[in-house]
Amino acid sequence: MSNPDQPEYTPMMNTYDGLPHEARPAPLTAEAYIAIGRIVRIAAEFEDAILLYVSRITGTKVHVLQTLLGQTPISRKIESARYLASIESDSEKAAFANAFGKEWDDFNSCRNAVAHGRYVGMVLDDDFAFSLPAKTLPTSPGKFRHKVQSYSVRALQFRADAAEIALTEVRRILGVESLHERLQTDRVVGPVHRKQKSTAEANQTSRKEPRK
């Protein structure tokens, strides 16, 4: 996710001193919901880029990969694509590593928290805290301690902005720009309609050709 137009990467997730902090009940704001929606949408577009990459280097049709890998967690898709890149060539391996490095890990950690975590309220300086089931620990009967990931609205917006900028660069690095454009066309008009349109245009062109 490296991009020269992207602001210098600075992790913005809070780190804790190990002491418990009380979560205050508070609703998520409209700004937070919008930022979270953008994060989830952009992550789905990265997922598409991974499938397109696998399609390119294996020659497998995208709809076949969508059928086989549709419900596979994105982390597993990335590991599969990373392995395929490593056996394809050193240049493919390096390109994939460049596309999915530490910036991606941070973004995906945030995406996991806001998409799959349970919102538990505000902590510290009005940061929204999310707890994942695997990070919930019982402390005494009827009481639990949650290890949370917390983000301010600004931190959520920063991640969405940075990932949106990086997405175009990732498609370029992976060599899937043209495949992405075709996928978008298929989603709008459908592959059958696109083929019919191309056939109709070809017939119209042939009818316009002067007879010799």
Image (cartoon, grey):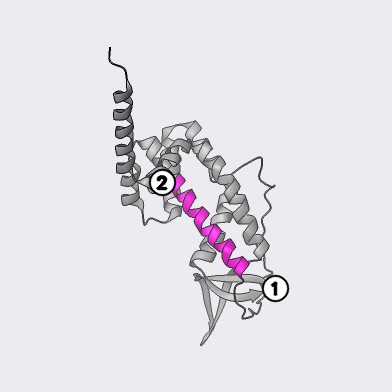
| Rendered residue at 57%/67% (across/down) | 33
Residue 46, magenta (yes or no): yes
Q: Which residue is mark 2?
A: 80
131 versus 89 height, above or below = below
Work out which quarter of the rendered image holds the C terminus and state it: top left
Q: Nearer the viewer, residue 209 or 129?
A: 209
Q: Which residue is mark 1?
A: 124
Q: Position of residue 108 (x, y in %)?
A: 53, 56
| Rendered residue at 58%/63% (across/down) | 34
39 versus 211 height, above or below = below
Work out which quarter of the rendered image holds the N terminus and state it: top right
| Rendered residue at 60%/69% (across/down) | 30
Q: Position of residue 169 (x, y in %)?
A: 56, 40
**Which kind of residue does numbered mark 1 sit on?**
Leu
Q: Would residue 136 be seen by someone viewing this image from the given angle?
A: yes
Q: Quadrant of residue 192?
A: top left
Q: Position of residue 137 (x, y in %)?
A: 52, 76
- N-term-proximal mark, 2 vs 1: 2
Q: Which residues are magenta?
A: 29-49
State the predominant SS element of the stretch in magenta.
helix
Q: Position of residue 97 (x, y in %)?
A: 53, 41
Total labels: the figure holds 2
**Is 173 left, or right, of 183 in this rendering?**
right
Q: Quadrant of residue 59?
A: top left
Residue 37, magenta (yes or no): yes
Residue 145 is tagged as none
Q: Nearer the viewer, residue 144 or 38?
A: 38
| Circles 2 and 1 in contact, beta carbons < 8 Å | no
79 versus 123 height, above or below = above
